[in-house]
Amino acid sequence: MTSVKQQAFRRGLHLEYFSTAWMTFEFLVGFTSGLKAGSILLIAFGLDSFLEIISGGTLIWRLRKSVTGTASDAAIAQAERRSSLIVGTVLLLLAVYVIGVSGYNLATHQLADTSWSGITIAVASVLLMPVLAVGKRRIGQRIGSPALIEDGMCNITCAYMAGTVLMGAVLTAAFGWWWADSVAALVLVYFIASEGWEAFQNGRGEG
């Protein structure tokens, strides 16, 4: 591997380190804020971030092995498929969970409390995710890594999800609409299920 390409791999690795660290922070803030506010929307957002940590960890392992050359292409591909299958399955189960809880909340008129920490993390994600996506796409193209490019696309999905979270949280805070959190969570299901199905297919080798 040339020194220029190896340097690009290292940049991709550092970017993924930062991305995974942010997802960890996003999970902690989103999930705990959701529990405190009784918001299924924020809980789902936090759990999705947790699954992104798993995906990011696999990609970090893959990039490190590519830099050091200590794993075969077959071993790397198998690890990526296994991670995709696990993440995809859990995402699909998460979508079912969100539908069930949101349906119950709508039927019983459950109102989530205002979560300013949830609103803050959503705003930060809306701003940061596109920047990460552009950086991963640029480096991924340079080193020929479809996995890094696909991970950048996941960041775009995360930005859409954060926008949905922000909309639901703001409507709840501004107008006290009891249904806003649950309806926004159901919108979130589209992104969760789409991401989950794609990961599941990739894990089965159908992507």
Image: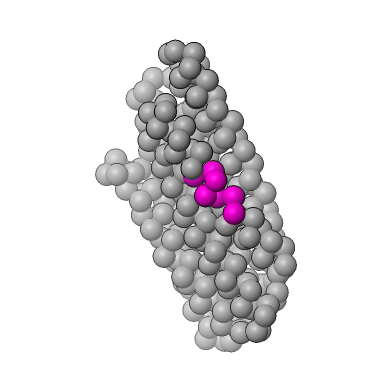
Classify residue 28 as left or right of residue 138: right
Taking the image as drawn, is residue 162 in sight? yes
State the extent of the magenta-drawn residues as a range.
Answer: 127-133
Q: Which residue sits at x=40%, y=32%?
A: 141
- In this picture, residue 84 sits left or right of residue 9: left
- Quarter of the rendering occupied by the N terminus: top left
Instruction: Give me the residue at 57% from left, 57% from top.
Output: 126
Residue 114 spot, x, y in % from top left: 70, 74
Image height check: is 142 above or below 51?
A: above
Q: Is residue 158 left or right of residue 37?
A: left
Could you tell me residue 24's position as x and y percent?
A: 64, 46
Q: x and y percent of residue 54 in the render?
A: 53, 42
How many numbered circles does the render carry?
0
Q: Is residue 112 magenta?
A: no
* Residue appearing at x 54%, y 76% in the figure: 182
Residue 86: in sight, yes or no? no
Picture quarter with the C terminus = top left
Q: In this orientation, which residue lies closer to the viewer: 112 or 116?
A: 116
User: In this picture, is 156 found above or below 98?
Assistant: above
The answer to whether residue 21 is above or below residue 91 is above
Magenta segment, principal secondary structure? helix
Q: In the rendered image of this protein, does residue 15 appear above or below residue 40?
A: above
User: Residue 184: image x %, image y %?
Assistant: 52, 73
Q: Which color scheme did the rendering employ for the protein?
A: one colour
x 44%, y 13%: residue: 2
- Residue 13: image quadrant is top right
Q: Residue furthest top?
A: 2
